[in-house]
Amino acid sequence: MIYTYDILLNWTKDERLKEFYEWNLEDDLEHIKKMPIIRISESFLKDLLTSKIKIDKSFLSKIKYKTESYFHNEIDVIDYAVIVTTLRKALALELDNEGNVMYKSNLLIDEEEEVLEIGEELVVMDIPYKVISKNNKVSYLTRKEEEEKKFLTKELKKIKQNKEESKLNYLFKEFFIDNVDTFNDKLNVLEKEISKDYNSFHHKLYNLLKLSTIKKK
């Protein structure tokens, strides 16, 4: 088992997790001495961030008593806790003895970067779980990713309204084989891609559009 050490967590039962810059001293902060790390799929991470999850009890033995925290100058052992990570985000979980995810926490930015680096060396673990209830109104994206998606939607709307065919052609050729002829068809392809779950395409398109905006100015 791979571990991370000496990190700070902000446990919450809320469906919308606090970003690190929203933390304050009145929150349920806990100083962790060590905690195991596992790598999971993007789809599992999305479910953890937007749903009430119950993880199969067969997984609990892998993490039992492996997390330690500092409590009044003593070491306190947490029964079931783990940090899960993909290549873009890390999330701390505390579970009960039935596998229900009771608490979640984001990480401080420098500590998350460390976990993401460790995650690159790990193999995705297949963990059985159930979605107990889902809340599609809760975003699983970071603030920056949400801003990028909003920016792309806004820029594509401008291209459509202003009939910026040359700009659309340029964007389309950067990402797709040019086998679509009409302005509207190309627009539809881009709109469909933007409407999908956030991925590397969104970030690359965002950077390209931002660059073209700077050049224009």
Image: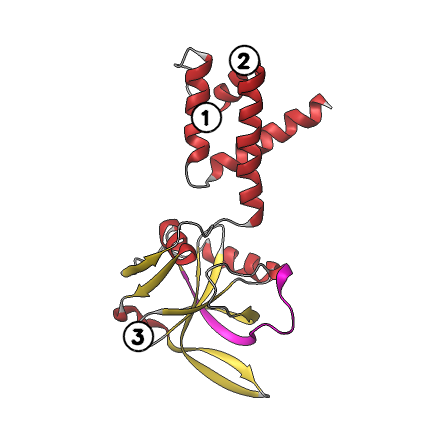
- Mark-to-mark CA distance, 1 and 3: 45 Å
- Mark 1 vs 2: CB contact within 8 A: no
Q: Which amino acid type is marked by label 3?
A: Ser
- Along the line of sight, the residue nearer the viewer: 27 or 60: 27
Q: Of the residues tagged 1 and 3, which is closer to the observer?
A: 1
**Disc 1 secondary structure class:** helix
- Along the line of sight, the residue nearer the viewer: 28 or 55: 28
* Total numbered badges shown on the rendered structure: 3
Magenta segment: 21-38
Quarter-of-image position of residue 112: bottom right
The residue identified by callout 1 is 190
Above or below — where is 188 with respect to 151? above
The residue identified by callout 2 is 165
**Of the residues under marks 3 and 2, which one precedes in the sequence?**
3
The residue identified by callout 3 is 61
Residue at 36% across, 50% down:
43
Q: Which amino acid type is marked by label 2?
A: Glu
Q: Of the residues tagged 3 and 2, which is closer to the observer?
A: 2
- Along the line of sight, the residue nearer the viewer: 147 or 116: 147
Above or below — where is 197 with respect to 62? above
- Mark 1 vs 3: CB contact within 8 A: no
The image position of residue 138, as x and y in percent, is 45, 52
The image position of residue 175, as x and y in percent, is 47, 25
Q: Residues within 10 Å of mark 1 (few under 14, many from 20)?
A: many
The image position of residue 206, as x and y in percent, is 57, 33
The question of residue 32 being in magenta is answered with yes
**Of the residues under marks 1 and 3, which one precedes in the sequence?**
3
**Of the residues under marks 1 and 2, which one precedes in the sequence?**
2
Q: Which amino acid type is marked by label 1?
A: Leu
